[in-house]
Image: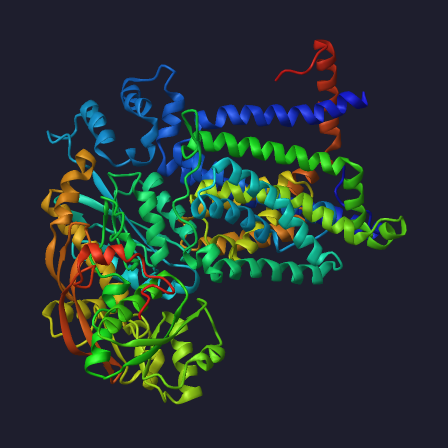
């Protein structure tokens, strides 16, 4: 039965001597791991042990506790902090004077991409979440991205922050969210960051109508446009809205008639290209070539070579390092002989410094400009710099901030009352209308924001406003039924001529 | 004597599995049942396909996610794109596993060791990019969302308990199947491939054919794992089969121990527990998983399972005594041991 295959006698003997200590260490580590797992188990989930102990006769308080737990074993995840659990124990101990139905604390779960290709963006987004909580009396636990905020409270109810990360894949995002909702008892989820994660979370959160998802920066149109979930809210634009106005500007002001597009090959860039072409082609423009590059492409030479020589401009929609790589290589190969027009995240403030001079003069549309002159924006920028030195406003920290603050404001309005399946809270959230750092926000019937966008140009490494585009809605001003009926944007939708 | 030994070897784990299948859904909370137990089971099934290849045939394959993904995608495409009956789709997907396995085996049949790893890695990465880019069929980066598991006679397999039963029974069947293969003459040939390729050839076997067959067998497990992962996630996208998942499978098998296929389930459980609960006390979950991996590799050649096996082999007298006592008792009862 000995697993070791026959070796030389000496080796064997040496092994025998050392394996004792090794085995001990190994066993220790294993035990540690198990203990770690159990520790997490015990801390977060008081319910399963209670259920198991229920049949045995127990002292009075324990039995009253176990009764509701026994009756509803399906909602263990949320019993920790919610009214159901708090009420009976209050009755027994009678330490609180009155107000038995007040929730003890509310847990907010924040999810962003803390691992994988977008990890840097995940850091930005958590800055936004924390800034909002600091406004409600919170204090930073530490400087790490995953360190939470303690001490925040709304209407006398403590707010706890749970932070989870994904690696931008939907599977991981759903598992992380499930952990927050079902294990940590989060009642409000802020996030996620990327488009397809958002669609996956919408499917998941639909089964938990009492939990509220306030989107971070997931910009997939269909998070709210088609088949919306009643407990999903988006206080920012989607990929198409962020690109609003570029097509018209390119045709009417810049005088382009025939363009090519280069974009990453997934839903979010489809929305950007779709929005540009919808406007551009409606005015009579044409698209010579739509080039789709795989996410994470390093070498763009073959794609640059595919761009026809006779186009007036190239619209490119990419994010993060892809945008940086593409612009650098395009610049080196062609010297920008054909002018570029950018998608919103391709020239977001989070990548501008990396692009340097190459980004100068690039035209784009987007939700964030640095010279809007809004008092709220300047205050946000100052506070951000103060709390997280060296950080400047970008789409990620602002959107997560706006999402978190909207949720906290709605909580305050309802006195932090999440009873009745968060009905009052969700109603208050849908009515939120306030002046964010990037302009006024108000939600439509699908709980999708109607927000200002900015047509902008990169000057001196910052985004300068060309024109403010007020109150952009989810259908870009087109007829709603027609717009929805044309289907989700894809590689070849809209057809354009 | 020999027969009773074997019966005990087979009966005990089976009884334990049955007890587990009955007890776990009662004890575990909804969250633990889904995200720990079910996840570990399907990840373990996928891991078992790799543990089988590594432990039995000595083939370190990095292409298991390709097989796994093929099955998952086949089911998702057939149901969501073509509206084909779910059971037919499941049957096609489960059949797709060994077919994909044979294909991966065919590609890598003439290589071994490092070259086999490189070839299968290429296959795995190819599958990822195929999913990512072959839009008309695979729907690209977004993949398939909103997959609904079947409902049969009021039993909704989207619910956690029914899903658990399906996954657990599949896991048991997979283990039984793989163990059966291991005990068969084919299993002997696989071990021959692992131990000495040339000698196997000298005995008249074709190493290439044996390699292909081993991949085919492992494809059965990988395919079923892929199908169950889609039932679990309700979705499949290239993100489900990217390079991170390839490595994750390897980590699962290494931590658990490839010496026996059951090790994959241990490893899957360990990794799942770490991923879910380590974040309660550390911000560096991935670092911890990596550290656990390194520690296990350093201190136990055969993972967690190896620790147990070694402990048992080191203390034969204790186990021997226990065993003889057990034997006496079971003889006294004169019947199959009831525990």
Q: How many marks?
A: 0
Residue B243, position as x, y percentages in the image: 53, 59
Check the picture and name the quadrant holding the C terminus of chain A.
bottom left
What is the basis of the colouring in this image? rainbow
Quadrant hosting residue A71 = top left
Q: Is residue B167 visible?
A: yes
In the image, what residue occupies the spot 87% across and 52% down?
B199
Towards the viewer: A29 or B297:
B297
In the image, residue A437 lies at what x, y percent?
15, 66
Task: Tell me residue A329's x, y (percent).
Answer: 43, 82
**Which residue ends up furthest to the top in the rendered image?**
B333
Frontmost residue, B170 versus A398: B170
Is A446 positioned to the left or the right of B76 in the image? left
Residue under the image location 26 percent in, 85 percent down: A361
Give above or below for A396 relative to A215.
below
Which image quadrant for residue A193? Answer: bottom left
Looking at the image, residue A10 sits to the left or right of residue B94; the answer is right
Q: Quadrant of the N terminus of chain A?
A: top right
- Residue B304 appears in the rendering: no
**Residue B60 point in image, percent of width and height:** 68, 54
Q: Which residue is painted at 81% across and 20% down in the image? A: B1
| Residue in front for this viewpoint, A355 or A27 | A355
């Amino acid at each position: 039965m000995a697993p070791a295959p026959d070796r030389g006698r000496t080796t064997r003997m040496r092994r025998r001597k050392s394996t004792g200590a090794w085995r001990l260490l190994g066993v220790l580590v294993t035990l540690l791991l198990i203990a770690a797992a159990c520790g997490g188990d015990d801390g977060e989930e008081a319910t399963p042990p209670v259920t198991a102990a229920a049949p045995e006769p127990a002292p009075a308080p324990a039995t009253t506790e176990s009764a509701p737990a026994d009756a509803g074993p399906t909602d263990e995840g949320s019993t920790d902090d919610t009214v159901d659990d708090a009420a009976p124990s209050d009755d027994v101990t009678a330490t609180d004077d009155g107000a038995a139905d007040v929730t003890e604390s509310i847990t907010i779960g924040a999810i962003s991409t803390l691992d994988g290709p977008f990890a840097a963006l995940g850091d930005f987004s958590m800055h936004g979440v924390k800034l909002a909580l600091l406004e409600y009396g919170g204090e930073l636990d530490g400087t790490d991205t995953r360190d939470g905020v303690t001490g925040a409270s709304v209407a006398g109810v403590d707010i706890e922050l749970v932070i989870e990360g994904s690696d931008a894949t939907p599977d991981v995002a759903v598992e992380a969210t499930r952990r927050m909702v079902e294990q940590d008892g989060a009642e409000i989820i802020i996030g996620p960051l990327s488009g397809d994660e958002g669609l996956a979370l919408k499917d998941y959160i639909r089964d938990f109508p009492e939990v509220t998802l306030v989107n971070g920066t997931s910009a997939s149109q269909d998070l709210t446009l088609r088949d919306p979930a009643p407990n999903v809210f988006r206080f920012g634009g989607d990929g198409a809205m962020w690109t609003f106005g570029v097509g018209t500007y390119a045709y009417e002001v810049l005088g382009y008639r025939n363009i090519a597009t280069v974009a990453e090959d997934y839903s979010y860039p489809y929305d950007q290209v779709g929005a540009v072409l919808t406007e551009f082609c409606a005015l009579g423009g044409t698209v010579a070539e739509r080039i789709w590059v795989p996410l994470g492409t390093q070498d763009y030479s073959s794609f640059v070579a595919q761009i026809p020589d006779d186009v007036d401009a190239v619209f490119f929609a990419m994010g993060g390092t892809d945008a940086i790589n593409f612009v650098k290589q395009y610049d080196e190969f062609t010297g920008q002989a054909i002018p570029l027009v950018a998608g919103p995240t391709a020239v977001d403030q989070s990548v501008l410094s990396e692009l340097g001079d190459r980004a100068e003069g690039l035209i784009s549309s987007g939700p964030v400009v640095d010279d809007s002159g809004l008092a709220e924006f300047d205050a946000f920028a100052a506070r951000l710099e103060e709390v997280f030195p060296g950080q400047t406003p970008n789409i990620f920290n602002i959107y997560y901030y706006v999402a978190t603050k909207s949720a906290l404001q709605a909580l305050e309005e309802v006195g932090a009352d999440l009873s009745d399946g968060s009905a009052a809270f969700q109603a208050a959230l849908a009515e939120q209308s306030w002046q964010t750092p990037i302009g006024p926000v108000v939600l439509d019937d699908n709980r999708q924001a109607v927000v200002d966008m900015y047509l902008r140009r990169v000057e001196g490494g910052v985004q300068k406003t060309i024109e403010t585009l007020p109150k952009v809605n989810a259908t870009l001003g087109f007829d709603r039924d027609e717009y929805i009926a044309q289907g989700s944007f894809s590689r070849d939708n809209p057809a354009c001529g | 004597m020999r027969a009773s030994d074997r019966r005990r070897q087979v009966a005990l784990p089976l009884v334990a599995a049955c007890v587990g299948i009955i007890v776990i859904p009662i004890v575990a909370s909804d969250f633990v049942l889904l995200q720990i137990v079910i996840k570990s089971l399907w990840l373990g099934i996928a891991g078992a396909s790799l543990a089988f290849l590594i432990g039995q045939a000595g083939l370190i394959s990095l292409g298991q996610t390709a097989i796994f993904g093929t099955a998952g995608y086949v089911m998702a495409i057939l149901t969501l794109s073509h509206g084909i009956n779910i059971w037919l789709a499941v049957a096609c997907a489960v059949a797709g596993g060994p077919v994909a396995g044979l294909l991966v085996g065919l590609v890598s049949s003439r290589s071994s060791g490092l070259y086999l790893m490189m070839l299968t890695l290429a296959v795995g990465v190819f599958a990822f990019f195929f999913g990512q880019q072959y839009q008309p069929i695979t729907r690209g980066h977004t993949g398939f969302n909103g997959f609904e598991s079947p409902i049969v006679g009021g039993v909704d397999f989207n619910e956690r308990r029914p899903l658990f039963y399906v996954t657990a029974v599949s896991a048991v069947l997979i283990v039984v199947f793989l163990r059966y293969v291991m005990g068969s003459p084919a299993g002997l040939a696989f071990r021959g491939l692992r131990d000495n390729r040339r000698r196997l050839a000298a005995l008249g076997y074709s190493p290439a054919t044996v390699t292909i067959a081993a991949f085919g067998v492992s494809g059965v497990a990988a395919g079923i794992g892929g199908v169950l992962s889609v039932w679990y996630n309700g979705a499949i996208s290239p993100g489900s089969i990217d390079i991170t998942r390839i490595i994750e499978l390897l980590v699962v098998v290494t931590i658990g121990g490839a010496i026996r296929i059951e090790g994959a389930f241990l490893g899957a459980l360990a990794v799942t527990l770490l991923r879910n609960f380590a974040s309660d006390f550390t911000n560096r979950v991935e670092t911890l998983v990596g550290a656990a991996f390194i520690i296990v590799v350093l201190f136990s050649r055969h993972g967690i399972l190896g620790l147990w096996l070694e402990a048992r082999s080191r203390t034969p007298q204790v186990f021997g005594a226990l065993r003889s006592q057990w034997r006496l008792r079971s003889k006294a009862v004169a019947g199959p041991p009831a525990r």
